[in-house]
């Protein structure tokens, strides 16, 4: 079965493809209209993107919305993770803002988590969702140059996501966990049609 991946983020697309293709899914991309992410939760935003892509292509569409929740910042940047330092800010600018806001926060109060919501919308209206969470903490400085977004400052144990291989990250990440749960839900759905 063919699925459209609803994202304009090339690195996120690569990560989704890397995890979905081994599950036997044929994934395609298309130039899609931008969607206003007006939801107040990651799940709501993932649904908005998936529904829009499904309506534009008449294919089942998979979208994710994910972000970083920092306890010391009362949950920020949260659903605004991509726009945290302004609408067109770079990853480096977002990280710089986060580290500046966290500079006086002691190690024991730097807890954070990445959250990922996956949503698949089918042309017949069926919707499948899954969520994954990865607990960690915010580093005092960037570590590693892998990954994207906040990966170089998100620590799991002694390493940042930016220091992990793709395989290591996929195994423990919020997106990897969400996609594992999603793939099981999708298989159940397809087997029960």
Image: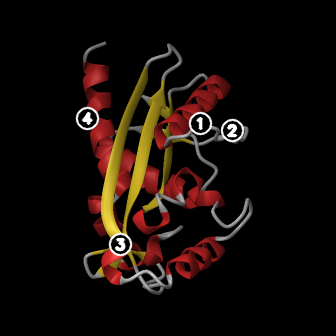
Residue 124 badge: none
Q: Earlier in the sequence, mark 1 or mark 2?
A: 2
Give me the residue at 56% from left, 59% from top. Answer: 81
Q: CA distance from mark 1 to mark 3?
A: 29 Å
Q: Quadrant of the C terminus?
A: top left
| Quarter of the figure with residue 172 | bottom left
Residue 20 vertical placement versus 14 (above, below): above
Q: Earlier in the sequence, mark 1 or mark 3?
A: 1
Q: Which residue position is annotated with label 1?
A: 49
Instruction: Indicate which label's residue lies in the foreground, 1 or 3.
Output: 3
Asked if the residue at tag 2 contacts the one at tag 1, i.e. Cβ–Cβ closer than 8 Å, the answer is yes
Give the x, y percent position of residue 143: 43, 85
Residue 137 badge: 3
Q: Which residue position is annotated with label 4?
A: 184
Q: Quadrant of the N terminus?
A: top left
Asked if the residue at tag 2 contacts the one at tag 3, i.e. Cβ–Cβ closer than 8 Å, the answer is no
Q: Secondary structure at mark 4?
A: helix
Q: Which residue position is annotated with label 2?
A: 35
């Amino acid at each position: 079965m063919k699925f459209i991946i609803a994202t304009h983020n090339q690195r996120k697309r690569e990560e989704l493809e890397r995890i979905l293709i081994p599950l036997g899914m044929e994934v395609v991309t298309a130039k899609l209209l931008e969607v206003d992410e007006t939801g107040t939760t990651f799940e709501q935003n993932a649904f908005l993107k998936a529904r829009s892509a499904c309506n534009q292509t008449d294919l089942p569409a998979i979208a994710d919305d994910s972000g970083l929740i920092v306890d010391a910042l009362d949950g920020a940047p949260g659903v605004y993770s991509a726009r945290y330092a302004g609408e067109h800010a770079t990853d480096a600018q977002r990280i710089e803002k986060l580290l500046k806001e966290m500079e006086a926060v002691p190690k024991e109060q730097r807890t954070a988590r990445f959250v990922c919501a996956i949503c698949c919308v089918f042309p017949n209206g069926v919707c499948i969702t899954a969520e994954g969470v990865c607990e960690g903490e915010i580093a005092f400085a960037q570590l590693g140059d892998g990954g994207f977004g906040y990966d170089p400052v998100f620590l799991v144990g002694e390493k940042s996501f930016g220091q992990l291989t793709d395989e290591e990250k996929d195994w423990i990440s919020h997106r990897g966990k969400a996609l594992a749960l999603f793939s099981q839900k999708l298989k159940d759905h397809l087997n029960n049609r």
